Image (tube, rainbow, N blue to C red):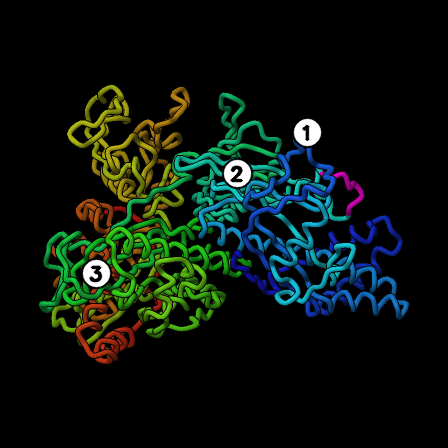
Amino acid sequence: MSEVKLIIPDKSSINIDRDDVLRRTGCGKDNPHYEEFIREFEELLPTVQSAINPRAALGFFDYPGFSDVKRKTEGSKNTGFGRSPAKGDPVLYMICTVGAEVSEMSSAFFEEGEYVKGLLSDAMASSALFGMEKPVFKELRRICKDRHVGIAKRFEAPVHVPMEIQKTAFEALNAGENLGLSITSGLMYDPVKSSCQVFAVTQNEHIMRLTHGCADCPVTGCADRMKSVSIRVNTSEAVYEFCAYPGSDLLSLLQENEIYISAPCGGAGRCGKCAVYIREAKAVKEASSQALKEALPSGMRKELACRYIVNESCEVSLIGSAKEDITALGSIEPRSQKAVLGGGMHPGSLNTSYSAGSFAIAIDIGTTTLALSLTDPENGRVIDTHTAVNRQRRFGADVITRIEAACAGKASLLRESICRDLADGISVLLIQHRVDPERLTCAAAAGNTTMLHLLMGYPAKGLGIYPFTAHTLKLEKHSLGDVLGSAADALPLSKLKDMPFYLLPGFSVFVGADIVSGLYSLDLFNSTELCAFIDLGTNGEMAVGNRDRLLVTSTAAGPAFEGGNIEYGIGSIPGAISSVSLAKKPSLPVAGAPSDDRLRVGGSNKIAVDIQTIGNKPPAGICGTGVIEAVAELLRVGLIDETGMLDEEYFEGGFPLALMHSDVPEKEVPIILTQKDIREIQLAKSAIRAGFEILLKRFGTDYSGISRLFIAGGFGYYLDVKKAAAIGMIPRQLIGKAEAVGNSSLNGVIRFLTALYKESSSGQTTIRRLKELAESGEEISLSSDPDFGSLYMQYMMFE
């Protein structure tokens, strides 16, 4: 017998929609009692929400067949659902209920003569039962994913399967004991606000047809009648199919079905990065300044997923950067091999030899990328590192849009997304290296304050509004099961639910555990030298100090360094332009083949452009380092003046860098660096530079007092420091002192795990030192600093 899964949704996740309830009662706007119904609805809503007791049970079984029952659906034409299940077919039974109390309430109203309240409360109970689908289907998708199966069809009794299936499912799921239901001789459930569904199971896990197809149902007068649309999504990895009710935007539907698509602005319609191809679809478009009117062959057109309202079935193809494969920086040694102060340790190379003893998992949760290292805690060596895109990115590219998403009711989706990403990464490392889960002793993670809050499901509202307070900044010790939740239910992680899982401490809401970890990796708390630290990213965290004093700050650099708000900006994916060189000479003919690891394309009859792309792939856009280098080169050859204004020849149309690769050759378009792009870089680089100058000033030092400048993060690792200095992002005087230190956050976690392992089981000394480091940081608030505004304007200019 299959294991029965119980789902108990949070009542707050079930929407009782007013318009749906009024529709069920037959009370339209033209009804003379319409206003009275609305008033009664608002008064009843809290009572009904309190009375519902949502529960669901499901399990996987073999369909029994009903040879002795006359079946109206057998032998009929294809109804859109396909044939009814045959005996022995794998199916999933699911029974949902909102409990008895709400039905008893409705009956009591009728008995008391409160007919409006009785009618409304009954309709509200039905709406709640229908509204259970969203949270229950979310859990059902997870269960199917864990079993690597999909849902091919949904069947309803008595239209597609006989009523006897209600009794079969009732007994199989033990609904009497598990859900408090009973069943009548007429095969109806009690409480009446309960439902039974049968789903055909397929081995294709990319198919998820969960919704009911009302168009095929003969019960035309049903109050629940809604049409269902079918959506087919083509990606480079697989073809996905799912059903949905009309009226939702395509981006939300893709997110619900865990199909990743880039949406840096969080679906606000600003960035234009969620563009997709739509084929033979009849959908309603919102008017939008971002609407893309490009005509494409074979009935396709280009639309923004966040602005595309799906009202009819359609086929979707993801475009280039919409499906990102960002190149993440794992735990690697600093370029100089000298980035550790005070003789501390740093991790070894990938795939080095390791002891046959214990293992640990070090994690860096970045806003854009994730990095997980399987380590030997006895000596700190890295056995392997798994990197991946943080799939929360589909809710927004920066912390602000994700905080907004969490506050808008998507907190559970954000938590589920990162937990599944981490569970997948840990599982990959264990399976690939055939590590017995019992040999894994500990895990620890660092990330900015928002990322750790979203991981744990902590309230995020305080992170986004004044006075900007965190739920906690302390070092935390949990179990892996507590951190990852249901994502740890499957093997091999199910054996590790009690394993210790540490979250490193942070300095503040804006300067988080990733910076604490980075400074810890550099042994700054033991250094007598005065050092500076800059993490070049969206949040622009910085520090200046040594073992005696430490100042930290962050500045809103924005997403430009990661390709955001740039016309042709993309993340660090294969094909992203990462390096640019210009020369004042005639351009060679446009070519797409690599030459000496570079591509010579773009430019004009005056300027030759050499570009390098990630992976030497055909150009697909430009990433942060490419934008920095392009601006620096345009400045060097005199096509940008000190104010940032492009030469008149390129002011309106922008400067062409390359031709973007396209599956439709006649639609290849140039990748342009626009005047607006240059302004975005000016804003970002000025924020970094002004913040850095404030730190030096408040510390009471100048450039000569800085012994070393550490540039952290994947962006900083690949940055040409001289070109960063050329645009004024860092001082020219510190070029010779600058060192790229790679993923210092991940390296700090590795150091922490190694120190913890070498101590006694309590690890109190290591934990105390990390806490002391976090508590020693004095945060400088740039927003309230009297000099920041003038410095910000000063460094907006190019030197």
- Residue plotted at (64% across, 63% down): 54
Residue at 35% x, 31% y is 671
Q: Is residue 16 visible?
A: yes
Decide which of 634, 568 is in the foreground and name it: 568
In the rendered image, which residue does mark 1 sit on? 77
Residue range of the region highlighted in magenta in the rendering? 217-222
Q: What distance separates the C-alpha of mark 3 from that of mark 1?
A: 59 Å
User: On the image, numbered disc 3 is attached to which residue?
Assistant: 375
Mark 3 secondary-structure assignment: strand
Which residue: 37% across, 52% down? 390
Specify few, some or many for label 3: CA neighbours under 10 Å numbering under 14, 14-19, or 20 or more.
many
Q: Is residue 782 left or right of residue 216?
A: left
In this rendering, the answer to whether 437 lies above or below 682 is below
**Label 1 packing within 10 angstroms: few (<14), some (14-19), many (20+):** few
The residue type indicated by label 1 comes to Lys
x, y percent for residue 113: 90, 67
State whether residue 696 appears in this view.
Answer: no
Q: Is residue 417 above or below residue 576?
A: below
Residue 171 appears at what percent x and percent y?
64, 58
What secondary structure do most residues of the magenta stretch adopt?
loop
Query: Where residue 57 sits: x, y (%)?
Result: 59, 59
Write down the residue under mark 2: 241
How far, Cα to Cα, is label 2 from label 1?
Answer: 22 Å
Figure check: 647 above or below 548: above
Q: Which amino acid lies under the numbered mark 2 shown in the image of this protein?
A: Glu
Q: Looking at the image, which residue is at 35% across and 51% down?
A: 368
Residue placed most toward the observer, 625 or 9: 9
Say whether residue 99 is left or right of residue 527: right
